[in-house]
Amino acid sequence: MCEGGAAPFSHPFFGNFSVWLSSYEKTTNIDCGVAVLSEDQVFIGIDPTAGKRPLTYAALDRDLRPIALGSGDVEEAAAFVAGQARAVAAICGPLRPNQGLMKLDHVRAGLSPVPPAGRWQDFRVAEYQLHQRKIRIPRARPQVDRCPAWMQTSFRLYEYLTRLGYRLYPSPDESLQILEVNAHASYAALLECLPFSKTSLEGRLQRQLELYDLGLEIPDPMRIFEEFTRYRILRGIVPLEGLYLPHELDALVAAYTAWTASLHPERVTILGDASEGQIVLPVKVLKKKYIE
């Protein structure tokens, strides 16, 4: 039995599991249709913010090889994560609502820069610290029902994983850990500038190229230009095989952040207050400001 008396999912994989496009199996060597309970450590990124289904997830092994890429609802994603014996899961969303720490004088006094009186009180500490660096992310509100649907999904997923035995990072002695990430902030930190819009072609190329250069065993996005011809452009044919979709790239950078946090903790920066929610970034040092 899991903590809280809830039974774990009876099987880590399920009949209605939504696997990704079959073309990705051909272009990325990722077997989307076969799921295996892993005894090795797995690094998982979960993005609840976009896509036709509520969640997109990616999993990497220790050698940065993608071993899973798919989508599903909260229960399906939690079932996949539950099937891992040793895992670090990164969620692209807050783990809990705003706890009101930015209203406390002693918390505000410890920040740099110290926020002006009466300002930034509706932000979490981590959100304030990112905004000061010009990395603007959505803020979690104190009332769950006032948070957007994807954020409520993030809260729900965190509750599920906690019941399944996951503990907040850093918990070095735990085989199952969970951490909060923000994909936009992670890409900004890695690129050392604000990235292009993630829905644009250049934004997708930029993100995938960064992941490729970091060592992920994914297709080189620059290869798509080999398929661009005058005829195809004139006929409105844009060959994008092997180029990931925005929410897949968000899930992949989350998985990379989980990998970095677990295997190379000296290379990450943690923002925020542990009692409210901390955001982990996959770089050792942050710039003071990030610009386009």
Image (tube, rainbow, N blue to C red):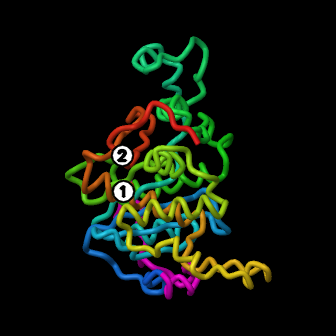
- Total labels: the figure holds 2
Residue 144 screen position, x and y as percent: 62, 42
Disc 2 from disc 1: Cα separation: 12 Å
Residue 85 visible in the picture = no
Query: Which residue does the image show at 41% across and 67% down from the upper left?
Result: 81
Would you name the residue on which mark 2 appears?
283
Residue 184 pos. (x, y %): 54, 49
Residue 161 included in the magenta stretch of the image: no
Instruction: Name the element at disc 1.
Output: helix
Q: Quadrant of the N terminus?
A: bottom left
Quarter holding the C terminus is top right
| Camera-nearest residue between 15 and 233 | 233
Residue 197 vs 39, above or below: the answer is above
**Vertically, is 47 above or below 269?**
below
Could you say where residue 21 lies in the image, as x and y percent from the top left?
58, 82
Going by the numbered disc 1, the residue's amino acid type is: Ala
**Residue, far top:** 117
Residue at image mark 1: 258
Residue 8: x and y, percent?
Answer: 40, 68
Query: From which residue to which does the magenta span run?
Result: 1-27
